[in-house]
Amino acid sequence: MFFKQRCQLPVVIPIAIGSHLKLAIGLCLLIFIYLPTAICQQLSAGKVTYNLICKIPFAGGAFTTDNLQNIYLYHGNSIKKYTSQGQVLYTYSDKSYGAITSIDVNDPMKILVFYKDFPEIVLLDNTLSQNGNPFSPSDAGYPFATLACTSHGNGIWLYDAQNFQLIQLDVNLNSAQKTGNLAQAIDIQLNPDYLMEYNNYVYLNDSAQGILVFDSYGTYYKTIPITGLNTFEVRGDDLFYISKNKLHISHLKTIMEDAIKPPDTLATEVRVEKNLLYEKYQDTLRVYEIK
């Protein structure tokens, strides 16, 4: 994953193959390891240039991206999947459950679509075709689930707004982990609006309180004191978000943070996938190559 390591040393892998092939593999490894690191350092230092790749019309709704650099625009009850070049790949639409609240593409082969109003969860494959039967958190005893995302091991995380708790459902949709009442345990007023899992950490965002971080067992770890957000992205050891017309890079393993000027200062949301920057701006989504 991009930005995974900042200063990783080259690894020598002894393989009984021809010297030319070993050299090619070594060069590929070096490119994979060092090129993303260099781009990350450029972003942090503000020494970047942006090359516009495409503009996609985007009036209303929300977007996300996967680790293959694909784009997902969703609005109302429909989703459109694009390449990073702006080409439409697949579409999905279902009026049965109202408006889509969120989608999770952490695993591009298993996309979670969450409808808050019912609530209902639909799983899609990489072609945006329905994969299995829809699932209601009410069937598992959680009719007040307001957030959902995928979890490791083909599970699902839910946020139960009635009991202020995170619940992890296993592959059979049985409760595997519960946090208990977080409002009481952490002694805060809790009204979260965004939930995601990445690298075995669970991030629960409350725009007034900050980003609550849990381990893969649902144990509370810490709160990142960044408030006023309703969306963000975690890649490697970095957290990306837009605030006050700047792209902020918060380094999760340190207390340091960098802020740089994005291509369009009126951008309302950004994401980074490898060497690409995605920027939501008024009525378009813009994709830039980071150089």
Image (tube, grey):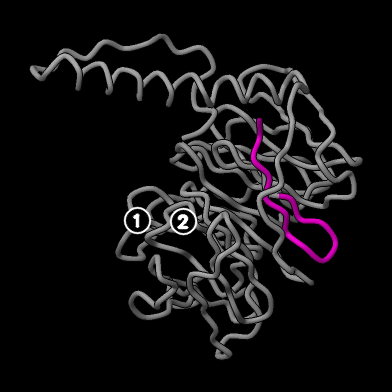
Where is residue 110? Give x, y as percent: 39, 62
| Side (left or right) of 170 relative to 264 | left
Assess whether residue 130 is covered by the magenta stretch: no
Q: Residue sitting at 75 percent across and 21 percent down?
A: 47
Q: Which residue is mark 1?
A: 154
Is 238 drawn above or below residue 191 in the view shown?
A: above
Occupied quadrant, residue 282:
bottom right
What is the magenta range?
279-291
Q: Residue sitting at 66 percent across and 61 percent down?
A: 63
| Side (left or right) of 76 relative to 118 | right
| Side (left or right) of 273 relative to 285 | left
* Secondary structure mostly taken by the magenta-highlighted segment of the chain: strand
Camera-nearest residue between 131 and 192: 131
Please name the amino acid that badge 2 sits on: Thr
Where is residue 277? Give x, y as percent: 67, 43
Give SS at disc 1: helix
State the mark number for residue 174.
none
- The residues bearing labels 1 and 2 have C-alpha atoms spaced at a distance of 7 Å
Give SS at disc 2: strand
Q: Does residue 135 appear in this view?
A: yes
Q: Residue sitting at 67 percent across and 56 percent down?
A: 54
User: Which of the image's four quarters has the C terminus?
Assistant: top right
Where is residue 82? Give x, y as percent: 55, 64
Category of crowding for the residue at label 1, using alpha-carbon neighbours closer than 10 angstroms: few (below 14), some (14–19), many (at least 20) = few
Q: Does residue 183 appear in this view?
A: no
Camera-nearest residue between 158 and 285: 285
Q: Residue sitting at 62 percent across and 82 percent down?
A: 77
Camera-nearest residue between 244 and 255: 244
Instruction: Tell me, yes or no, whether the two marked residues, 1 and 2, touch with CB atoms within 8 Å.
Output: yes
Q: Which residue is mark 2?
A: 150
Please name the amino acid that badge 1 sits on: Asn
